[in-house]
Image: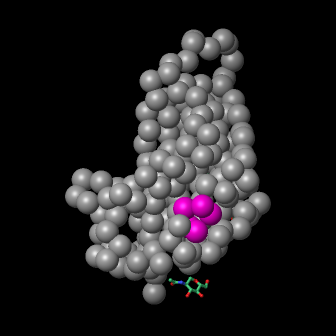
Amino acid sequence: MARLHLLSLSLIVLSISYSSLSQGPPRPQLRANAQAFLDAHNNARAKVGVLPLKWSAILESNTSLVFQNQSGLRSCSFAKLSGTTYGVNLIWTTGPLVSPQEAVTSWVAANKYYNFAHNSCLSGQQCGGYTQVVWNESLELGCAQGLCADSALTICIYNPPGNTVGEKPY
Ligand SMILES: *[C@@H]1O[C@H](CO)[C@@H](O)[C@H](O)[C@H]1NC(C)=O
Ligand SMILES: *[C@@H]1O[C@H](CO)[C@@H](O)[C@H](O)[C@H]1NC(C)=O
Ligand SMILES: *[C@@H]1O[C@H](CO)[C@@H](O)[C@H](O)[C@H]1NC(C)=O
């Protein structure tokens, strides 16, 4: 039986604007900093007694594919993630890339809205980014960051996926 997983999206809009670009179609630039992403995730997991994630080159290449698909776009978009069998956390920014630490911190910050005893999130808030970071059954992580012409995207994917509806993260 298929288990239902919630896809969590985080949105941070930075107010830094780009100067207008020169000619030519924009090419997304790829950047991944595995250790920084891993450390930020595993620090958050250690705080709640959950074992660390391992980096997966396959997951990293999957996130990189998303950016390659966006080649030529002015704005990065969230497109083409529906149907994935992985857990996904995303941050879209109108300014330059956030650091891996900032990206993960933005997901983990929702822990103040998360009620573990009731496995619930304060009304109007999104806790899915946080619960995916600390999801005990997720074992592997891959992240990538990409720059489109006027925006930037950070994606982390998780295997197996977390946020199974009706289950606690740990
Ligand atoms: C992830 O990448 C692997 C190897 O590159 C590929 O076999 C797999 O189909 C990809 N998965 C998704 C969901 O794109
Ligand atoms: C890339 O785009 C193709 C064609 O739209 C789509 O089939 C594929 O799933 C996309 N892959 C990723 C990783 O977004
Ligand atoms: C977390 O997963 C490990 C095995 O991967 C398991 O031994 C442990 O009991 C789990 N912890 C919780 C709190 O579910």
* Horizontal and vertical percent position of residue 114: 34, 64
* Horizontal and vertical percent position of residue 47: 53, 67
Front residue of 139 and 115? 115
Name the chief secondary structure element in magenta: helix
Q: Residue at x 60, y 46 (%)?
A: 101
- What's the coloring here? one colour
Front residue of 123 and 31? 123
Q: Is residue 68 left or right of residue 108?
A: right
Residue 83 visible: no
Q: Residue at x 47, y 55 (%)?
A: 108
- Extent of the magenta region: 42-46
Q: Residue at x 31, y 77 (%)?
A: 117
**Within the image, what quadrant is residue 69 found in?**
top right
From this view, report whether residue 127 is shown above or below residue 74.
below
* Horizontal and vertical percent position of residue 53: 66, 68
Q: Residue at x 66, y 48 (%)?
A: 144
From this view, report whether residue 117 is shown above or below residue 86.
below
